[in-house]
Amino acid sequence: MQSSLARIMDWVRENASPLLQDLNGPASEADIQAVEAATGLSLPDSFKAFLRLHDGESGAMMLALLGNGNQLLSCQSIIEQYRLDQQIGQELFDPEMDAIAFWKDRTEGQVIFIKGAVKPLLLHPKWLPITWMNGDVFRYLDFDPAPGGIPGQVIEVDPESCMYQVLAPSFEALLDLYASQLEAGMFAADDEGFIERIAEEDIMGWGVPDWLKNA
């Protein structure tokens, strides 16, 4: 984790230094333990190591270390968002939408878009929010993946667009991938420090993931 983060920080210092002001200081051990106690989820060592360096981002400048406006949540924000997610999930729960037949039908009809082994749920008690973008696109540590997935994988969920994708098998792997993408010129930053991916993937080509085809 440290090596990948150092590569990211080197790129940011050279290309998007204003966003460094938005990074929070270290989270305390009590802060980290509070997240685990409030969610009932054990945080991966790599994510805890990151929190010990930076307790998310303040959001004051609306910039994001991980690019595309995906701001890292602080420990307190993780707890608040997790509780809000569960409340909304209970209010909107529909057993018809929590079924493989529904997922397969909607994915084949390109109403739901899935990339990788992630369940297309509204919300899940074993999804830990770690970033948000505009308050409606979230990245989670997914501790209950679809068949073939890895517990602790990083997923991105855009409920409004019905998009669900696996970004990396772990938080550490996400940082390593992102560092490589930055170094490969796949992202650019403006003068204010906003990092944006140069080209986005066409979701229409995702199709039906293998785990759902074979379910």
Image (spheres, rainbow, N blue to C red):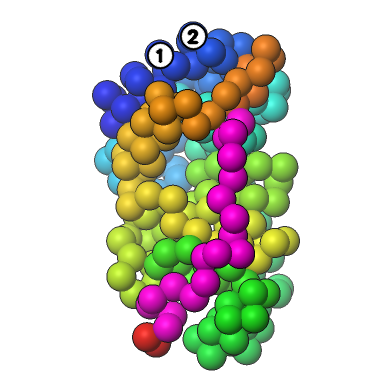
Q: Residues within 10 Å of mark 2 (few under 14, many from 20)?
A: few
Point out residue 48 in the picture as x, y percentages from the top left corner. Answer: 34, 36
Disc 2 element: helix
Kindly identify which residue carries mark 2.
14
- Of the pair 34 and 145, the residue shown nearer to us: 145
Say whether residue 187 is left or right of residue 209. Answer: right
Find out whether residue 164 is within the magenta segment.
Answer: no
Say which of 45 and 169 sits in front: 169
The boundaries of the magenta stretch are 196-213
Q: Residues within 10 Å of mark 1 (few under 14, many from 20)?
A: some
Residue 212 in magenta stretch: yes
Residue 133 image offset from top left, x and y in percent: 66, 42
Q: Label 1 belongs to which residue?
A: 10
- Please, is residue 35 above or below residue 114 in the view? above
What is the quadrant of the C terminus in the image?
bottom left
For the residues bearing labels 2 and 1, Cβ distance under 8 angstroms: yes
Q: Is residue 54 above or below residue 135?
A: above
